[in-house]
Image: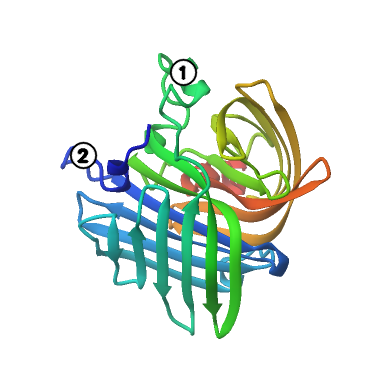
Amino acid sequence: MIQDADIDFHPTDPDQHDWAETNYFAFFNAELGICGHLQALFRPNLGVVMTDVRIWRGLVNRSWDALYVANHHHQPMSKSLRRYTLPSGLSVEALSVRDYRVDYLGTDETEIHFDVRGIMPPYDIADPEMDPVTRRQMDGGFVLGEAYRGHWDMHARVTGEIRCRGETFPIDCVQVMDHSWGPRTETELPAMMWLGSYFPERDLAVHAFFPADPAASDTLSLAHGYICEGGKVTGLTGGQLKLTRLEYQPIAGIWEVEDADGRRLTLYGAAIAGGPWPVYPSVDVGISLMRWTLGGDVGHGLAMENSAMAYRVRHGAAARG
């Protein structure tokens, strides 16, 4: 179970140089085809932080066609995650484990200001009392790798506005935020898909992780996830994602899930915004704002699939001969 203490940095071996803690806040305006995020990745044993701020309008296939990009590496980090202001212009205040204030002052007449209010408790994928897949895997390792052994997700209402290159866009959406801690390599990070959706007419949110092998398969099997309906959270016991990609960019999917109560849902989705996200020089992500249908209801949420450049090179044209 996630506690208040999990807002902040977690104890680790001070010699573990690749230990990372992340804060991830995403937002969108589906009507305008706008999406974006703010990520802070801290390396507490090195005393540095990387921040990445991106905004997309529509769906693009080149990094430089994003509406806004600001990536800062190896800046001095804060002493706490409860309240911090970084040299990159990102400020975060944790009011509780479910509630946050996020502000960003960037370049090119760009600012971001919003409040995050959790609509559910944080979902701890490593807690066997909360996650039924983890209950089954306690003696069999951790399918997502050590980088995500410490991790929670939470659907939250995000309200505020962004001002990008002089234009102002209102934000009022329900989107997943997360926090991770653990050893995280930058060269061999295991490929995985992370995605969610919220259906306002049902007050229903769905979220899931899937290990990925994008060069070999378009069908992914569930690692962890949940359904949250009316504030009640139920862990997923199974699921499958049949993904359509343009190169490494998710553009459509059929998403099937089953929860611990035996409820089965099938979602059909297509990308309406997003693009490549080179989160590190050695890891790239395809991130998309997806429009999902569930019966006659429509929902939205971000989907992202990462894979290491080492993985892509192994499966690239030169490697194939």
* Residue for point 40% across, 58% down: 100
Give x and y (percent) for residue 191: 52, 40
**Mark closest to the chain's N terminus, 1 or 2:** 2
Q: Nearer the viewer, residue 121 or 165?
A: 121
Q: Amino acid at mark 1?
A: Arg
**Res 11 label:** 2
SS under mark 1: helix
Give x and y (percent) for residue 95: 35, 56
* Residue for point 59% across, 67% down: 171
Residue 54 horizontal side relative to residue 147, left or right: right
| Residue 38, placed above or below residue 17 | below
Q: Quadrant of residue 161?
A: bottom right
**Quick one: which residue is furthest to the right in this view?**
296
Residue 247 appears anywhere in the view: no
Residue 89 horizontal side relative to residue 62, left or right: left
Residue 24 horizontal side relative to residue 156, left or right: left
State the residue position of label 1.
Answer: 135
Residue 124 appears anywhere in the view: yes
The quadrant of the picture occupied by the N terminus is top left
| Residue 249, placed above or below residue 63 | above
